[in-house]
Image: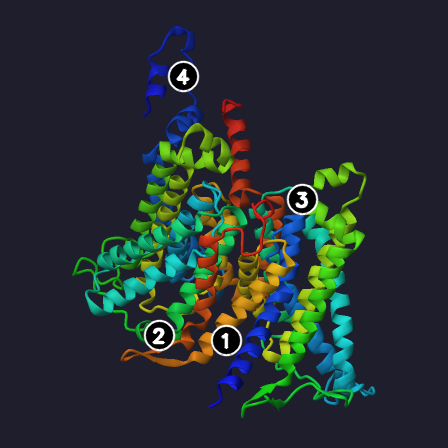
Amino acid sequence: MNIVGELIVLLVNGLQTGAIYVLLAIGLSIILGTLKFVNFAHGALFVIGAYAGLLITQEISISNGRLAEWGYPTIGLEWGFFAALVIVPLFVFVVGLAMERFVARPFYDRPDTDQILVTFGLAIVVQEVIHALIGPRTYGYEVPTSAFGLLPMTGPIPVPLSDVTINVWRLWVIAITAALVIAVYAIVEYTDFGLVVKAGTRDPEMVRLLGIKITRPYLVMFGIGAALAGIAGVVGGPLQNINPEIGMTILVPAFLTVVIGGVGSIKGAVLGGTLIGMVQVTLISLGSVGVGGFTVNFSPWSQVGIYVLAVIVLLTRPQGLLGSEEVSA
Amino acid sequence: MSDEVKSAETGEPAEVESPSLYDRWLAVREREVTVAVLTFLGVFLAPFALVALPEMLGIPTQYVWYRSLVVLALIWGIFAIGYDLLLGFTGLLSFGHAMFWGVAAYAAGIFSANVTGSPIAMILVGTTTAVLLAWVIGWISLRRGGIYFAILTLAFGQMIYYIFLSPLGWLTGGENGFNEVAVDPLLGFLPLGAEVAVVPDILVQTWMYVFVGIAAVLAVVVANRVLNSPYGIVLRAIRENEQRAEFVGLNVWRYKLMAFIISGAFAGVAGSLYVIQRSFVPIENTLNWTVSGEIVIMTVLGGVGSLFGPILGAGLYMYVANIVSGMPAIGHFWHMILGLVFVFVVVLLPNGIWGGVDWLRERVGDALGGDER
């Protein structure tokens, strides 16, 4: 038993669990903060990403997939996976643009309850379309064992100073998420485009009066949010099983991440996701603990813990940990 | 006969014109007794219209509205009326109403296994539990409005689901559901599954139907009473403009909390009835968030802001979910079709299908008695 090793495993697992929530929450948070649009179909974008990635990597890239069945040469899991990492976000970006144009835009001026209802209906439709096209079966998701023979991508690696191992894919998820978060943060903070979007968050009327067409930045922002959800599907897929219902199950923790972190704040999304991931993983790994004669089993509470966390934050800091009062009103 | 009609009959020579049938109808239409009688007739005739009549007309029986479905539709209808009090009349979109329905179901089920299986006692226990839960959840969630309220209620619904699924698994049966429900005969001597002797069974088949039917009529009457009281008017005022209601000096938060609790009580009654009908508490059909989604769909499809719309929506949903889903070609896609119809209704028909019925009724009314309204 090595406490340092255990803590490192806990940290990696927590960060990785949170990373998926962060990827989803950034899109939700930006769209909610700038466009004031509640997207209950964000989980559907995650599922679209996961299935598109699955199709590219498994069905058309490895030797027993569709492409091989039809008699075409296959490109192998390795190439397929990296192709998916590029193609899927582009694809979901386009899906996001379409969604902004045809679903969200007509609803900007309607009450937020209508926005929730229509996106909720859309999420059901997407789920059922996948159901009908691919079936209710649960799929496993494979990741190449190494990136072009250079770096390991799956499989256990030993943690220094201890006798435990972690799955290296978890480190990849954390790294990919970190890179994307930094990129999005840079775009929003340091480009003219980001400036317009941020100004739009504060006062859309004023931005329009200044002669800036705000429609296009909104469209692009929606697409970026969607693309992030798509990537979340590809990198999160290998860690769980894929079925049409996961979109709805993952939507709740993603929303809680936004609520905990604060609407419209990228830093908040990162903080919220990390907190949720850590709470969940800590409760699971605590297992049974003897407390003064009683044995308390914490692992069944791991799902409950994140809701308790969200309630505590909301009651003490309603605008979220890093949210500002005005944006979250 | 109403006072208005009488005074018209015995009135001044200037208005000797005897009231048309339509005027008389207008005079009695809004009365509580009328609502009760109409609801009673609807509940009484539903099994005939939905089961016996299609059978007589020779519609293939495998698609006919199965008997127990009429009972289920009424139970979901009660749930939907309560939900509409919140969404349609107060303007609060809750995405966690499954928790009141589900917790009431568990409370009634566990109570029946351990204390007594009297159906009335089960309803009382289930509803009380739901009310207490609604009080706590409402007290916390109503601190935030709009989207936050929807997200918070969704989160609480999930939280209760996970609590009942795992940490409380020793009590609730976990994912297998609670299967020790023991329902006694009604009032001690009327078994719910037995046929009612005096009424022909094409109208009322079992005591179960009588029991649920009475509950449904009562639910409509109570909802009607709440909505037409000063309290209901305040709720509508809050839906229209919360800020203005606040400025008039109303304690908006308290009214919203009460609306939430009343709505939770309806869900509690319905949840307890559901367990009495099924003699089993399945966790996926009680506490899963999909149930919250279903009740939203039913209410919005049927029509928010009307008394009978949600019942219509519940009936329609039950029909599609249980009978259309069994049809050969389209059965597989029933959920998708329902989702598309739902999106269509949200976009184009803000008052749901009942809104369309209302529109038709107005047209007929205009044709009969002019545009007096």
Cα separation, mark 1 vs mark 4, equals 78 Å
Rendered image: mark on residue A202 = 3
User: In this view of the protein, which residue sits in the foreground, B281 or A10?
Assistant: A10
Dot 4: few (<14), some (14–19), or many (≥20) neighbours within 10 Å? few
User: In this view of the protein, which residue sits in the foreground, A312 or A234?
Assistant: A312
Cα separation, mark 4 vs mark 2, equals 69 Å
Q: Nearer the viewer, mark 1 or mark 4?
A: 1
Q: Point out residue A108 in the picture as x, y percentages from the top left corner.
A: 66, 45
Cα separation, mark 2 vs mark 3, equals 48 Å
Q: Mark 4 points at which residue?
A: B18
Rendered image: mark on residue A281 = 1
Q: Name the residue under label 2.
A: B169
Chain letter behind tag 3? A
Q: Is mark 3 on a helix, strand or loop?
A: helix
Q: Do the residues labelled 1 and 4 touch (CB within 8 Å)?
A: no
Q: Point out residue A262 in the picture as x, y percentages from the top left corner.
A: 57, 55
Amino acid residing under circle 3: Arg
Residue at 43%, 49% in the rendered image: B83
Above/below status of A292 relative to B103: below
Chain letter behind tag 2? B
| Sequence-earlier tag: 4 or 2 | 4
Q: Point out residue A42 in the picture as x, y percentages from the top left corner.
A: 63, 61
Cα separation, mark 1 vs mark 3, equals 36 Å
Dot 2: few (<14), some (14–19), or many (≥20) neighbours within 10 Å? some
Amino acid residing under circle 2: Gly
Q: Is residue A327 left or right of residue B49?
A: right
| Quadrant (top left/top right/bottom left/bottom right) for the N terminus of chain B | top left
Q: Point out residue B248 in the picture as x, y percentages from the top left corner.
A: 44, 28
Dot 3: few (<14), some (14–19), or many (≥20) neighbours within 10 Å? some
